[in-house]
Image (cartoon, helix red, strand yellow):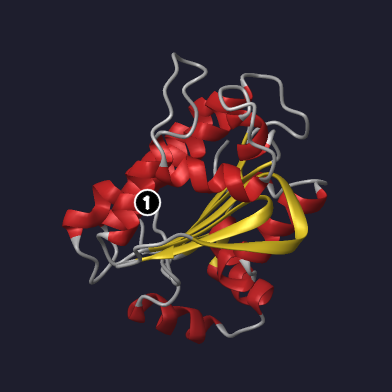
Amino acid sequence: MAETLLTIREAAKRLGVSIDTLRRWDRSGKLVAVRKPGGVHRFYQASDLDIFTNDLAALAYNWAVAGGAVVPDYYCSNSGQFQARLNRLQHDVQTSNGFDSSLVALIIGIAGEIGNNSFDHNLGKWPGMPGTFFAHDGFRRLVVLADRGIGILASLQRVRPSLSTSRDALFVAFSEVISGRSPEARGNGLKFVRQAVIQNPFSLVFQSGDTQLQLKQGDTKLQLTKTAKVVPGCYALIYY
């Protein structure tokens, strides 16, 4: 689906600022405009304006917890759409001012692992709305992912029936090698995610069920916290 483009006048009205302010933000990199090939006029992607004005983390979390409609610009209904947007994310991160280009592959690897899990582990039997919420806030250097799938506990119970809590499931997923043939080999990639985060200037918030994990560079232990709200599937924030 093609991105919706707004003129600078439409964007200024939507944000409640002047056209001159948008031009200044474009020059400073605070809110970058796009230009059509060979053109000089500024246009703005509707999704970029949404990112600028909304708290994506809250938007994704509320959808993951309560369901309902999802903003189309942030929704991938199938793995093909997810891969296409992952490629776009790679381009956006590569062109970020001041970002270490050697870390781009790791960011894409982390986001790809978490997002692909949403499709691989639900196997077309989504209990809630299929697909993933996937958005990138370049201003905050944040990647947001969420799904309404079966979650980590139910996924791992297929190979570890003794697991009974989301806390135990998250601990196993991020710290233990889990054997099993595809598609039963659950959670192994999340150990790659853990290593990538603790060895680099990243941080991660990951929730499934009633347990949230927080991880940052240098952490030697997993910080697991019980939450008041339950995420039926998975929810992740990647800061880079």
Q: Secondary structure at mark 1?
A: helix
Residue 88 seen: no
Whether 122 is drawn above or below 104: the answer is: above
Quarter where residue 238 is shown = bottom left
View extreme (left): residue: 102
View extreme (front): residue: 162
Q: Is residue 137 left or right of residue 10?
A: left
| Residue 119 % position (x, y) | 56, 28
Badge 1 amino acid:
Arg
Q: Nearer the viewer, residue 81 or 40?
A: 81
Q: Which residue is mark 1?
A: 194
| Residue 168 % position (x, y) | 59, 46
Whether 226 is drawn above or below 125: the answer is: below
Residue 87 seen: yes
Q: Nearer the viewer, residue 73 or 149?
A: 149
| Residue 8 % position (x, y) | 54, 69
Q: Which residue is located at x 25 percent, y 46 percent?
A: 105
Whether 229 is drawn above or below 119: the answer is: below
- Figure disc tally: 1
| Residue 223 % position (x, y) | 50, 64
Q: Is residue 222 left or right of residue 27?
A: right
View extreme (top): residue: 181
Q: Which residue is located at x 30 percent, y 51 percent?
A: 195
Quarter of the picture containing the C terminus is bottom left
Quarter of the picture containing the N terminus is top right
Quarter where residue 130 is shown = top right
Q: Residues within 10 Å of mark 1 (few under 14, many from 20)?
A: many
Q: Which residue is located at x 72 percent, y 27 percent?
A: 126
Q: Which residue is located at x 29 percent, y 64 percent?
A: 96
